Image: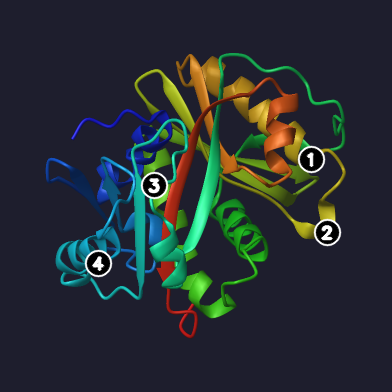
Amino acid sequence: MKVRSLGYRTDLIFPAFDGEIIDRGDYLVILTPDNPTFHWGNFLLLSNPPGPGDLVNWKTIFNEEIGSRLNVEHQAFAWDTVTGELGQVKPFLDDGFNLIQSVVLTTDRVNPPPKYNHEIVVRPLTSAGEWEQAFQNQIVCRPPEFSLAGYQVFKQQQMERYRQMTRAGLGVWMGAFLEEQLVADLGVFVTGKIGRFQQVGTHPDYRRRGICGTLVYQASRYALEYLAINTLVMVADENYHAAKIYESLGFKPTERQVSLEWWDETTA
């Protein structure tokens, strides 16, 4: 299956590193065996939006391809769209799935944010202690629907993946520091001449100070200069304010993504 979507093509950087990507012709099976609670590390990427009967069909495929191999308590489906077509999602929504609509933003250059924070220093992480600060910041920034205990298990494995990828020369993890305290962080990883952002997070106590925009701006400049790329890719919730921050830096919407996920909220 040839993936058209730039958003999903860059998503595949990560399972290509330490997971599995199985091509079944009209869908891809994405597996991250070391992190079975990672919804978007263990999902199906299908060639077309859902149609009649696909609620049952897709759930059956997921159970056969992923549920039979890993101890998962979720189901996650995405399809290879660039325009955000929904298809027949209503049966999934009626069955308890959540619909996720995202915008893919790209740029080849950035400009300073309207609200630039001159107090922070943005630089790559250099020590185990700084990686631990980044892990803790990611935990504090977790979505409210996930429990602390469950999210820690997922995030520990995810951050270890990112750290191993930086060691392999596939990207960089950047922190925004106030003196020695990390207050925001993100990653940028490379495939060809494309750099894909990951997990932008600002500590709740330090929001609305221009830190996020400053961090993304400085990380973008670093990536364009030192990672030998010519296109930056950011995926954001279409309805979340962060997308506007990225647009203020010069990112432009180029694609729209749609996906569906369900999980057992009693174990989240």
SS for callout 1: helix
Q: Amino acid at mark 3?
A: Gly
Q: Residue 38, can we see it?
A: no
Secondary structure of residue under mark 2? helix
Q: Earlier in the sequence, mark 3 or mark 2?
A: 3
Label 4 – label 2 distance at C-alpha: 44 Å
Q: For mark 3, what is the residue?
A: 87
Between disc 4 and disc 2, the foreground one is 4
Tags 4 and 2 touching, CB below 8 Å? no
Residue 211's label in the rendered image is 1
Mark 1–mark 4 distance (CA, rounded to whole Å): 45 Å
Q: Which mark is residue 205?
A: 2
Residue 219's spot in the image, x, y percent?
62, 29
- Residue 235, image x, y percentages: 54, 38
Q: Earlier in the sequence, mark 3 or mark 4?
A: 4
Identify the element where label 4 is drawn: helix
Disc 1 versus disc 4: nearer the observer = 4
Location of mark 4 (residue): 56
Residues under labels 3 and 1: Cα distance?
Answer: 38 Å
Q: In this rendering, which labeled residue sits more in front, label 3 or label 1?
A: 3
Residue 84, compared with residue 190, is above or below; it is: below
Residue type at the position of mark 1: Ile
Amino acid, disc 4: Val
Q: Residue at x 16, y 72 (%)?
A: 68
Q: Quadrant of residue 92?
A: bottom left
- Distance from Cα at disc 3 to Cα at disc 2: 40 Å
